[in-house]
Amino acid sequence: MKKQLLSAVVLCALSVVGCEEDLDPTPDGGSDAGTDAGTEIKYNTADKVFTYLEGKTMVMQGANIPSHPNGINENLLYDPSTQCYNKVTMQMSSRNLTVTSVRAVVEGASGQGSVGDCNRDNIRDTLAPFVSTVVNIENVNADGTCFDITATFNGFSQSGRGLITQDGTKVQLELYFAATGHRCADGAVGANTVKLNGTAFTGNAIQTYVIQ
């Protein structure tokens, strides 16, 4: 199927952090996965989020990879910023992230800046791990449904919003290299509030990691 080129300017490489089928969005585009009626809200402060993720491995693959990681069409060939992935693994240690990405092949692309089809099962290569210098988590909703996150790496950063499901099995991260309207104050994870280069973003950028 012929696809249109992404209009947003590609700023940098590597997705740190899909959308999973069993996490149905609410009508306003957000997720209802952050609360569990009748139980304690577990992840509603930055310390609780960091403490729970410390030492854990988080894996995104298959249907959990969104169509637009970091707001960039996975079918767009634009190295080194191509966002076509087979698998992404994150590990939290001392409040910093180590991210290892297994890239997949954009098949049928005619060259740089063209659109093909991201075949997530066709492995291209594995990037050397990226280690963050700072990870900030702040503005955590009292009901645990959203927190703001900024991850800074050597040469680039990502920012957006996220949540840990209250059963502790998954973390959702909606991250962008450059955007507006992508914070919890603007809406829940996945809300239709994001703009890239002043244009409304209509893709899916929610990356879902299974916590191991």
Image (cartoon, rainbow, N blue to C red):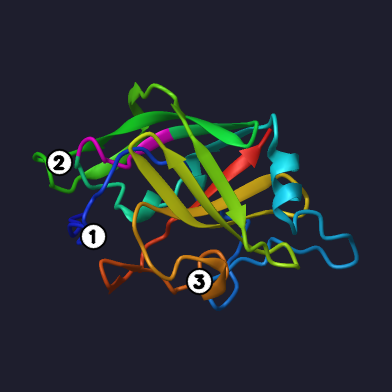
Alpha-carbon neighbours of circle 2 within 10 Å: few (<14), some, or many (≥20)?
A: some
Amino acid beneath label 1: Ala
Q: Which residue is mark 1?
A: 8
SS category of the residue bearing label 1: loop
Q: Of the residues under marks 3 and 1, which one precedes in the sequence?
A: 1
Query: Which quadrant of the structure image shows residue 147?
Result: bottom right
Q: CA distance from mark 2 to mark 1?
A: 18 Å
SS category of the residue bearing label 3: loop
> In the shown orientation, is residue 164 left or right of residue 48?
left
> In the shown orientation, is residue 125 left or right of residue 16?
left
Q: 150 or 123: nearer the eye? A: 150
Residue ID at (24%, 38%): 106
Q: Which residue is mark 3?
A: 191
Q: Main secondary structure of the magenta part?
A: loop
Residue closest to the far left: 110
SS category of the residue bearing label 2: loop
- Magenta-highlighted residues: 79-86
Q: Position of residue 163 (x, y in %)?
A: 64, 56
Tag 2 and tag 1, C-beta contact below 8 Å: no
